Amino acid sequence: MPATEAIVAPTETPVRRNQGLKTWLTVMNATLGAIEQTVWQGRELAEKALRAWRDMEAGVELAREEYELIAREAAQWPERIKRLSKTGWMLTRLTTSYRFWGTRSAFMSRARMVTALDELHRNNARRFVETSLQQGGAFLKIGQLLSARGDILPEAWVDELKVLQDRTRPESFEVIREQIESSLQQPLQTLFADFDPQPLAAASIGQVHKAVLHDGRVVAVKVQRPGLSELIDLDMALLKLFVGSIESLLPPTDLDTITNEIERTLREELDYRHEARWMSDIGARLEQVEGVIVPKVIRSHSNRVILVSEFVQGSNFGTELNRRQAAGDHAGVSNLLGRLLDLYLRQVLQFGVFQADPHPGNFLVTEDDKLVMLDFGCTMQLSAAFRDGYQKVLGAALVDDSDAIVQALADLGFRTRSGKPDTLLAFSNALLNQIRNAAMNMGSGKMVWPTADDMLREGERLFRMAEQDPVDKLPAEFIMLARVFTTLGGLFVHYKPDMDVNRYLLPHLIGPAFQAVRG
């Protein structure tokens, strides 16, 4: 397991013990500091409220509005303090257990050490999952985002965090009704002719209900859970505190960029107006693509916390893949995965804007075999320079031109600590080798998908290289691209499609190059 080498400490010196104690005390101090800061902020809030009340008593008209705003904010503080104590204590326990691991492991055999470390990872991940499910909202979303980050978390963590993808508790219908009516300033029956109180799906940020407009259109109503925006600052501060405290135990990489991207995407997801804009933008670009549907936004019923769109009936993408595989329909499996690959190559290399969460739950397959794309809350826009640079990396990888790969990655902003390209090339090969092999060997009978052991060995090799010469700088755009293509890669390795990759890949590489020559 890649993370094994990071935390195993065969010998424990006084210096390492002192460093561990220092880090543990730093985490404890930072947690207490966060609590203290929360208390002081609450105290300042009380003083503001007192001043506003005195102004109101004196007849200042604007004071009433200010006081009402303060009262709403004050109502959040008891919940914030409760949340901080639970989450902060859980993260402190996790960090402390890892710091004491160095001492424990010094008395274990090598074989026992590996097993014990896996147990430690799993126990800590389960604590994280339990707290995420209890706290919900923004913290649950952070857990879901981390569940897709096998590049920075040990395998045991990723396995346990996957539970968060489908264990979200829905809000009650009364809460949803209140959120809709207060947000859109109209009664539910005025807005909809019919509204199903049972949600179709529930996620960390919101849940989706089926409804009918008064003109007869069937729609999907995505409603954000109330009170989330007030919790983001606190939850992200706790996450950064935790990651910072165990940074030395994680694979060496640009963790600041990764956590900043998690925060950016989380904040964007809390404003459904962003999602509505990207949904319409990408939908318009894909209108001429046969067999792809993006539901249209109903703007009259949408705002920051409500998103209403056309309802499209279909089966879950993952469920459909499993059905076809069980029926022995290998051509059908390959066709679906090939179209999904084409959809992302089109977005990334042609549009320069892409939905960055290719989870099977975000796609449907209709009865007439059309692909329905959902959930644009996590969307990334690429600059023309970055899009062109990524295209160069992909093209150079296909012909195995290492010099061109290194130059393109440097132009995009990748940097290793030493300035040497070896680690960058290793990671580039890990991401793109499978595509190159598929493109080169298709039709030759030589196409072999990697086994779990193959991937484990490759991960261990990459981790050793990253330890020796870490990648200190990653462009923010690459964080989302890596998320997309590692998720797609996981689907391909799992289902092992027998498909002609060139059919989907080459039009996106040759087309722009040909246009550039003609221009």
Image (cartoon, rainbow, N blue to C red):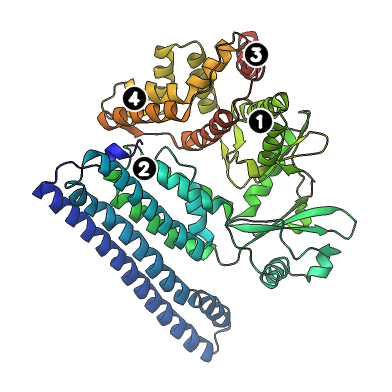
Judged from the image, the secondary structure of the residue bearing numbered disc 3 is helix
Whether the residues at callouts 2 and 1 have beta carbons within 8 Å, the answer is no
What's the distance in space between the residues labelled 3 and 4, CA to CA?
A: 33 Å
Q: Amino acid at mark 1?
A: Leu
Rendering coords of residue 161 (x, y %) = 48, 50
Whether the residues at callouts 4 and 2 have beta carbons within 8 Å, the answer is no
Give the left or right position of residue 37, taking residue 504 as reference. left
Give the left or right position of residue 57, taking residue 238 as reference. right
What's the distance in space between the residues labelled 2 and 1, CA to CA?
A: 29 Å
Looking at the rendered image, the disc whose residue lies closer to the viewer, 1 or 3, is: 1
Q: Quadrant of residue 110?
A: top left
What residue appears at the point 41 percent right and 41 percent down from the top-left corner? Answer: 155
Give the left or right position of residue 237, taking residue 216 as reference. left
Give the left or right position of residue 334, taking residue 158 as reference. right
What's the distance in space between the residues labelled 3 and 2, CA to CA?
A: 38 Å
What residue appears at the point 48 percent right and 83 percent down from the top-left corner? Answer: 52
Position of 137 relative to 319 (above/below): below
Numbered mark located on residue 255 in the image: 2
Rendering coords of residue 48 (x, y %) = 43, 79
Q: If you read the primary sequence from the N terminus, does the residue marked by circle 2 or circle 1 appear first?
A: 2
Numbered mark located on residue 423 in the image: 4
Mark 3, residue position: 515
What residue appears at the point 66 percent right and 30 percent down from the top-left corner? Answer: 340
Q: If you read the primary sequence from the N terminus, does the residue marked by circle 3 or circle 2 appear first?
A: 2
Judged from the image, the secondary structure of the residue bearing numbered disc 1 is helix
Rendering coords of residue 467 (x, y %) = 27, 32
Mark 1, residue position: 340
Q: If you read the primary sequence from the N terminus, does the residue marked by circle 4 or circle 2 appear first?
A: 2
